[in-house]
Amino acid sequence: MPRKFFVGGNWKCNGTQASIKELCNSLNKGDSVESSPVEVVCAPPAIYAQYAREHLRKDFQIGLQNCWIGKGGAYTGEIAADMIKDMNFHWVILGHSERRHIPELHESDDTIAKKVEYAQSVGLKVIACIGETLEEREAGRTQEVNERQLAAIAGKVKDWNGIVIAYEPVWAIGTGKVATPEQAQEVHSFLRTWLRNNVSAQVAENTRIIYGGSVNGKNCAELAKQSDIDGFLVGGASLKPEFLDIVGSFR
Ligand code: PEP
């Protein structure tokens, strides 16, 4: 069975009730993807998740951008995976580069792996992000860094059907510097081979590996043609009507 194209919209820490309503209204204008081979998940800031669900078309799912490492309790300010599940949301983004690299957050491979494990244990599906920095790429460490980050996550995954891997080179996120289709394909192919060699041929074949980093309505079509690119995680352009063009790039 071919891998179903996947498009995630990461709204990050943006929005107000008014702007989210306006965004939903514009996204609601596109053709239904209900019976199309594409899955769409938009991730608003947690406080607006329910509000966004009330306003957004029903063929687009709502996910969260992060969760706590384990069960809830005395962790002021955190949101537990159980709560996300309890509110009937099914997806969470984990390991986003902003959570890995912003100094005040600085999540480690180990923290992210634990979050993935716990989120899966309560039945959430995970968009797990990995990717090298510019410094790492220029030092020729792209494969080593992506392998290390993927291995940490893979070691904790119980259900591969509930994981999407997002390859997001840090140098391409929010910078306007998109990876070329060849650069992205090279890493995606490396990751799929890693899954084949270290998990199983079936997991390698079935797992969706999506690309993120300055994807927009113009560059998505060429990226989508690459054999190992199964969709996108989109930041800036997910807040604009052109997100619909990115969703449509599965065609
Ligand atoms: C992201 O934040 O996951 C992302 C890919 O951002 P952008 O599309 O803005 O580069």
Image (cartoon, rainbow, N blue to C red):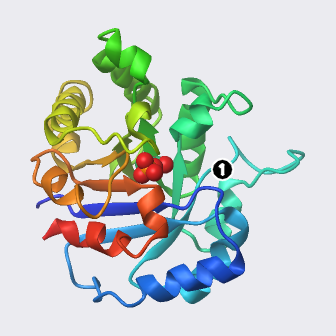
- Residue plotted at (65% across, 69% down): 15
Query: Residue at horizontal 90%, vertical 46%?
Result: 74
State the image coordinates of residue 178 (x, y, percent, origin top left).
30, 42
Quarter of the rendering occupied by the N terminus: bottom left
| Residue 143, percent from left and from top | 28, 19
Q: Nearer the viewer, residue 113 or 175?
A: 175
Image height of 239 relative to 169, above or below: below
Mark 1: few/some/many CA within 10 Å (<14, 14-19, 20+): many
The correct choice, above or below, for 138 with respect to 28 in the image is above
| Quarter occupied by residue 131 | top left
Residue 12 seen by the camera: yes
Q: How many marks?
A: 1
Q: Residue furthest top?
A: 139
In front here: 145 or 120?
145
Q: Residue 105's spot in the image, x, y percent?
A: 70, 33
Q: Position of residue 88 (x, y in %)?
A: 59, 74
Q: Amino acid at mark 1?
A: Cys
Check disc 1 and report its element: helix, strand or loop. Answer: loop
- Report the quarter where the C terminus lies: bottom left
Q: Nearer the viewer, residue 129 or 173?
A: 173
Q: For the point 52% across and 36% down, which residue is it? A: 97
Q: Visible in this render: residue 162? A: no
* Vertical comparison of 107 with 221: above or below: above
- Camera-nearest residue between 154 and 240: 240
Q: Identify the residue position indicated by label 1 in the image.
A: 67
Is 211 situated left or right of 23 in this image? left
**Is 75 above or below relative to 17?**
above
Q: Name which residue lies at 52% across and 79% down.
A: 23
Left or right side of 146 for 63: right
| Ligand 1 within 8 Å of the CB at mark 1 | no
